[in-house]
Image: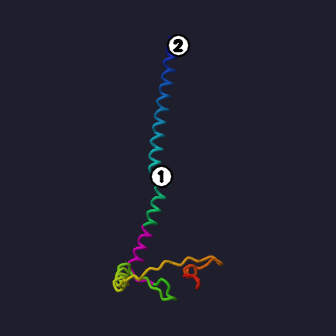
Amino acid sequence: MTEHRQKGKSSARVMITGLVMVLFFCGLVFFLVSEGQSIGNVEEVKAQVRLKNLADLNSENQKALMQYRWVDKSKGVVGVPIDRAMELVLAELQSNKPHPAGPVTPPVAPTPPGSPTPAANNQKPAGQP
């Protein structure tokens, strides 16, 4: 009978120890998951930095395309807004009228030295009819 009590006590201890270990494991998993969500992911942080840099670059480009600005003040080069630049180019292209094409002459091929020219072959000697 005493052996039966000891087996019951040891099995109860094993059950309690197992239950405590399972609860400890569940608590540890819950803690790690909650901490993992609060720590920012490195890739997310890098993506946010890249998006901010892209937004800054786009705003600078829009500003450059929509305003007058000095490109090189010492040379007197000025940047104009893109809409105005398109108007100026369009007006310039409309003022240039196309010219009719003249006759096209093929380029003359160079003759090697010492060979007769084509004009010399067409001439007949004075004594022959």
Which residue was labeled with disc 1?
Answer: 39
58 or 79, nearer to the observer: 79
Circles 1, 2 touching at the beta carbon (< 8 Å): no
Task: Looking at this view, name the residue that lies furthest to the right.
Answer: 114
Find residue 67 and report its horizontal and vertical position in percent. 39, 81
How would you classify the magenta stretch by its main secondary structure? helix
Disc 1 marks a residue whose amino acid type is Ile
Q: In which quarter of the image is the C terminus?
A: bottom right
Please give the name of the residue rendered at 44% of the width and 49% of the height, measured from the top-left corner. 37
Please give the name of the residue rendered at 35% of the width and 85% of the height, measured from the top-left corner. 97
Residue 47 - label? none
- What's the CA distance linking mark 1 and mark 2? 53 Å
State which quadrant residue 126 falls in.
bottom right
Q: Is label 1 in a helix, a strand or a loop?
A: loop
Q: Is residue 57 magenta?
A: yes
Please give the name of the residue rendered at 45% of the width and 37% of the height, measured from the top-left corner. 26
Q: Is label 2 in a helix, a strand or a loop?
A: helix
52 or 29, nearer to the observer: 52
The residue carrying pointer 2 sits among few (fewer than 14), some (14 to 19) or many (20 or more) residues within 10 Å by Cα, namely few
Please give the name of the residue rendered at 48% of the width and 18% of the height, measured from the top-left corner. 8
State which quadrant residue 79 falls in.
bottom left
Residue 3 - label? 2
62 or 101, nearer to the observer: 101
Discs 1/2, front? 1
Find residue 94 and report its horizontal and vertical position in percent. 33, 83
Precedes in sequence: disc 1 or disc 2: 2
2 or 61, nearer to the observer: 61
State which quadrant residue 122 falls in.
bottom right
**Magenta span:** 55-69
Disc 2 marks a residue whose amino acid type is Glu
The residue carrying pointer 1 sits among few (fewer than 14), some (14 to 19) or many (20 or more) residues within 10 Å by Cα, namely few
